Amino acid sequence: MDKTIYRGRTKGSVTAPPSKSYAQRAIAAALLCRGETVLTNMVYCNDTRAALQVARDLGAEVLCTEDTCTIRGGLRPSGRELNVGESGLATRLFTPVTALCDEEIVLTGEGSLLGRPVSMMEAPLRELGAEISSREGYLPIRVKGPVQGGQVSVDGSLSSQFITGLLMSLPLAERDTTMNVADLKSRPYIDMTIGLLEAFGIEIKHNDYKQFFIEGGQRYTPAHYNIEGDWSGASCLLVAGATAGEATVRNLNPLSLQADTAIIDALTRAGAEITTTRDSVTVRRNELRAFEFDATHCPDLFPALAALAAGCRGTSVLRGTRRLVHKESDRARTIADVFSRMGIDIDLSTENLMRITGGPIRSATVESHNDHRIAMAAATAALNSDDSVVVRRAEAVNKSYPGFWDDLRRLTTEKR
């Protein structure tokens, strides 16, 4: 599907979609409960649907309405294969959960996920007592538990998602676990996980994120859990307000533990005018200046930050590009490709840095590379084009934000 986005001015308000990161964690927690959990403000994007199906296949009873899911937990696998779709989080979250089972189960996926590494999970799960093998470090991956707990070492430099999976599964192991983590990135996502676990009655202790102490034999308590709004999905809409007029995004908690609340810091550095309330953010265009920003702990912001930098005077510097290699695309190179077609110079010649020189956006046809965040960022930049930008494979947004195109249309009140 192609989408044409015309030069336009933004004004108005929309509601941020629910967070798929919180939703998938909550689905896993509900699966591990004995009893009935109610999840409200649910998002039915592709990644969440995949997580719900995995929960069903692992034994949960799931009943969903328009924005509410009732899940009766129970780890009783009904088959020997789980399909996690294209969700990296579901892969790294549900592999340790599956390792609680005493039968062999195969996890597989689709699309770009088949080219994303899973090798970082193998040695730690073996240390914990599971049998595990993959296709030379990629899906499909075979797992047979149960994990027992004990001492384990994990490399945190590639992804925090596998650590999230361990934090969610190991409280149900027979023994206590001490997990030593080296070079943890994306710490805010671990805070999200620990906060959600508390809501389900699970306690995790840590020593400055380098050592985690997980008591075995804990029990999940069913909960009524509301999924908060997604700062990742909202980030491009906030940038649209900063670069093309004004935008208010509701259903955003400024005190959220989500890593991508950092978009407010970036917008502030760029000179945008920002107003926050307890559940909304309004951003207005101002004279925007080049900025520096370290996105190491919030790599999902890179596409939105690129759209922001494209609208700034001067050359902005973004740090943390090493985190972008194994996303839905090789995201640093994809950002450079897409924005260069729109006339924006992006320099990747320095390791771990992206330099973006702002300037006029020219009309172009760009490829989303089937990456939801690239599609949204290109559309955001297109609002300042000399006429229009065509985004190919625009349906990529369904991975996280199915309503994005409708919301962008609601905000774009007039053509310029």
Image (cartoon, helix red, strand yellow):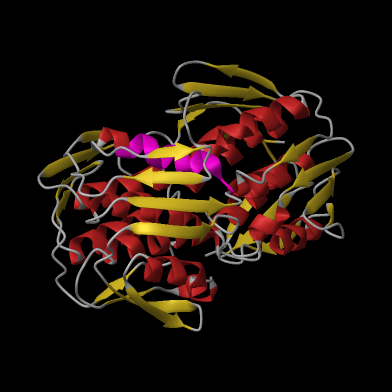
Q: Vertically, is 229 above or below 385?
A: above
Figure quadrant of the C terminus: top right
Q: Vertically, is 171 above or below 140?
A: above
Q: Main secondary structure of the magenta part?
A: helix
Identity of the residue drawn at 18% across and 44% down: 219
The residue closer to the viewer here, 194 or 83, is: 194
Q: Residue furthest left?
A: 35
Identity of the residue drawn at 42% across and 34% down: 229
What residue span does the magenta drawing correspond to? 185-197
Q: Vertically, is 150 above or below 125?
A: above
The residue closer to the viewer here, 37 or 365, is: 37
361 magenta-colored: no
Q: Position of residue 69 (x, y in %)?
A: 20, 45
Q: Vertically, is 275 above or below 32?
A: above
Identity of the residue drawn at 43% across and 52% down: 179
Q: Residue furthest right?
A: 314
Identity of the residue drawn at 54% across and 42% down: 187
